[in-house]
């Protein structure tokens, strides 16, 4: 394998890892504040991508054709709409089940994911077919031998990085972030200190879901295609990434995202090299198998959640 | 002592079963969409009215007091349906599918209804049974009864690979493992050429001691659909699985499983081996799913990866929740509703996943016990403290 090809794999892996990390950060945020898994996260991402596409079509119809304006409006609309959706999910599905067994929250959001998926499939015009996603980023590229550096990928990578850093700064440097961390650490005490518990929870869900919308747009811009089923796999991958890294820890989520994409790349490259005849399509089988084995070794992830049970 | 033994007469149970059988006959017979819709709504209203007048509680007490007569009446009900539709393929195929899915859901019920081990890969374990049957019937001359057993053993065996991670983790982490496994399994089937890839595999019909199930019986000039044979096999399996699960629940094993689900720490403190009971429930549940899968594959004569998606696993989980977690009777009713309703009401076929998912959300929000919530164990029929 040449160096050029290797760097191509690494770069593509970084790109995927960034998308996974964005999904995983959402999972970890929700788990942090409320100790719940919101499994509809992947499908919220998908709805975000479709919202972006619909906004784009609307803008086209209105005669706005500057790619930059289109992209900005799409991003804002998708992120706000999904933020609202996330807050609604938290208010009407997640918070009412706070006293029920934790499994019920997982189930209800799993089912909500199915509802979103099916709703897009059935009610979006021709929603069961893959939809072409517009190419709005400059298509310039530089080639170094076998390695092609595309400008659009570079922009996406930087945008993803910026979003994650922004969320990280929000959580560690602002008063709001302090409130979020307080709720995550001890909801009761946070309430006593005058923090509006419900508001903080809804806000956290909105932030996480907005991140998912960004992830959906990035995914659409990268592959130039979206479909109603893409959220399921991305959701499971994001969940796996968050768990590998350690739920509730934002660094863990980022680490997990890149690890998962590394596993996929290794699966795609190493499996056919080691066992001639196997197809690269086994990469997901390989990645998930490693995740399962990993869970047996480190049940709570690399950066373990601090857990002590009061009996 | 008398009131400990005979709380209610057996008649409410028998009359209820006769009513249910009659309704099933009418429902399966109905052709037009209006008739099916009318029957569905009529049944819902009738059930609400009956509940209003306390009939449902009486029937339930009667079933509890006369489980022998109650179980027998259910089996007779199924046989009556078979006798009425003896020459029609479709209703019998539906009936056999429902019975086999009941076996799978009983397995899931053991896992997360009793022991609290979540399994979001129910369809995958069912699929392992299907594919085991497909491979064994193609590449070996193993008697088909052994093939069915092999399907169960294979599902339990592959499931046991997941035991270590499942035991080491708890809650959400454990859920992830089965979800990951379900997706892994499906992708594996799609890319594996030896197992037919996305096109799947064909199977021959089942044969038990020279009895070819795919040849319909003929009495004189009456031809019985060959699916009737499968209904009988499936009925036998469902009855045995049902009895097994009921007996397990009533026994000290069931008590241990419940304890493990409710509080692992307290359980361990009382000397109950948590790992042992989780393994037992998980393995037994997967075994049941594999058994049912093997028979199902031979009945439909065809297996493909598309039947074992994550969505299918979710439908299985919905059945258990809709029926009432931990209640075998509840899941029996729920399986019948979930499988038959979309087949008869064509216009909801397209929307069925949406509908079930929505329904489960409502159930979890407003009636977490399910349609037929599980009752507290009743060791002495009719005994009230």
Image: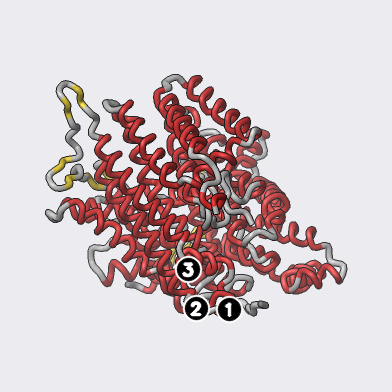
Q: Quadrant of residue A41?
A: bottom right
Q: CA distance from mark 3 to mark 2?
A: 15 Å
Location of residue B160 with respect to B85 vertically, above or below: below
Residue at 27%, 44% in the rendered image: B233
Residue A134 in view of the camera: no
Cβ–Cβ below 8 Å for labels 1 and 2? yes
Q: Is disc 3 on the same chain as disc 1?
A: yes
Q: Residue at x 63, y 71 (%)?
A: A248
User: x%, y% of residue B205?
Assistant: 20, 42
Residue A304 circle label: 1
Please name whichever residue, B250 or A205, is drawn nearer the observer in this view of the structure: B250
Residue B55 in view of the camera: yes
Front tag of 1 and 3: 1
Structural crowding at the residue carrying mark 2, measured as other residues with C-alpha within 10 Å and reported as few (<14), some (14–19) or many (≥20): some
Q: Residues within 10 Å of mark 1 (few under 14, many from 20)?
A: some
Q: Nearer the viewer, residue A126 or B366?
A: B366
Relative image position of residue B174 (x, y in whole percent): 50, 67
The answer to whether the residue labelled 3 contacts the one labelled 2, judged by CB atoms less than 8 Å apart, is no
Position in image of residue A200 (x %, y %): 77, 62
Residue A260 - label: 3
Residue at the disc numbered 2: A298
């Amino acid at each position: 394998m040449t160096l050029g090809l290797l760097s191509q794999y690494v770069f593509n892996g970084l790109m995927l890892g960034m998308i996974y990390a964005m999904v995983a950060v959402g999972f970890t945020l929700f788990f942090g504040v409320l100790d719940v898994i919101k499994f509809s996260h992947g499908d919220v991402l998908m709805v975000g991508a479709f919202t972006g596409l619909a906004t784009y079509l609307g803008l086209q119809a209105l005669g706005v054709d500057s790619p930059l304006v289109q992209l900005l409006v799409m991003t804002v609309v998708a992120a706000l709409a999904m933020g609202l959706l996330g807050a609604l999910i938290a208010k009407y599905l997640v918070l009412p089940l706070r006293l029920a067994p934790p499994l019920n929250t997982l189930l209800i959001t799993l089912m909500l994911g199915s509802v979103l998926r099916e709703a897009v499939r059935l009610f979006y015009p021709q929603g069961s077919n893959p939809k072409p996603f517009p190419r709005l980023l400059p298509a310039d590229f530089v080639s170094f031998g076998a390695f092609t550096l595309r400008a659009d990928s570079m922009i996406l990578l930087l945008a993803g990085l910026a979003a994650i850093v922004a969320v990280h700064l929000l959580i560690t440097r602002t008063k709001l972030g302090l409130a979020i961390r307080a709720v995550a650490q001890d909801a009761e005490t946070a309430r006593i200190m005058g923090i509006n518990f419900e508001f903080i929870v809804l806000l956290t869900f909105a932030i996480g879901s907005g991140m998912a919308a960004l992830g959906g747009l990035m995914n659409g811009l990268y592959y130039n295609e979206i479909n109603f089923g893409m959220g399921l796999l991305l959701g499971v991958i994001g969940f796996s990434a968050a768990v590998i890294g350690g739920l509730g820890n934002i660094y863990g989520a980022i680490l997990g995202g890149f690890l998962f994409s590394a596993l996929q790349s290794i699966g795609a490259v190493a499996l056919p090299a080691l066992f001639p005849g196997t197809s690269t399509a086994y990469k997901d089988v390989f990645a998930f198998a490693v995740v399962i084995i990993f869970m047996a070794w480190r049940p709570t992830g690399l950066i373990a959640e601090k857990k002590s049970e009061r009996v | 002592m008398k009131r400990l033994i005979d709380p209610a007469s057996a008649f409410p149970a028998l009359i209820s079963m006769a009513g249910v059988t009659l309704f099933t006959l009418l429902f399966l017979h109905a052709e037009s969409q209006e008739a099916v819709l009318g029957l569905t709504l009529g049944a819902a209203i009738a059930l609400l009215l009956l509940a209003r007048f306390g009939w449902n509680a009486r029937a339930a007490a009667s079933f509890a007091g006369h489980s022998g007569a109650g179980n027998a009446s259910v089996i007779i009900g199924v046989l009556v349906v078979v006798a009425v539709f003896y020459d029609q393929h479709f209703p019998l195929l539906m009936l056999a599918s429902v019975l086999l899915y009941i076996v799978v859901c009983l397995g899931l019920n053991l896992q997360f209804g009793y022991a609290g081990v979540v399994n979001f890969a129910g369809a995958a374990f069912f699929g392992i049974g299907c594919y085991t049957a497909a491979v064994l019937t193609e590449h070996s001359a193993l008697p088909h009864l052994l093939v069915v057993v092999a399907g169960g053993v294979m599902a339990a065996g592959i499931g046991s690979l997941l035991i270590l991670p499942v035991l080491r983790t708890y809650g959400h982490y454990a859920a992830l493992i089965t979800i990951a496994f379900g997706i892994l399994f499906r992708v594996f089937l799609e890319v594996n050429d030896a197992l037919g890839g996305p096109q799947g595999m064909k199977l021959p019909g089942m044969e038990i001691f020279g009895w070819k199930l795919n040849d319909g019986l003929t009495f004189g000039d009456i031809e019985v659909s060959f699916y009737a044979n499968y209904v009988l096999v499936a009925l036998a399996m469902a009855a045995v699985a049902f009895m097994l699960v009921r007996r397990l629940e009533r026994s000290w094993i069931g008590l241990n499983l419940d304890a493990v689900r409710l509080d692992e720490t307290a359980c361990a403190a009382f000397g109950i081996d948590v790992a042992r009971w989780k393994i037992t429930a998980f393995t037994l549940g997967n075994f049941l799913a594999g058994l049912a899968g093997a028979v199902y594959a031979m009945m439909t004569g065809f297996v493909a990866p598309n039947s074992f998606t994550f969505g299918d696993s979710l439908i299985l989980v919905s059945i258990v929740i809709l029926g009432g977690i931990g209640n075998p009777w509840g899941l029996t009713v729920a399986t019948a509703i979930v499988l038959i309703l979309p087949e008869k009401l064509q216009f909801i076929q397209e929307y069925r996943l949406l509908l079930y998912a929505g329904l489960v959300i409502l159930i979890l929000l407003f009636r977490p016990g399910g349609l037929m919530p599980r009752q507290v164990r009743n060791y002495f029929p009719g005994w009230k403290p």
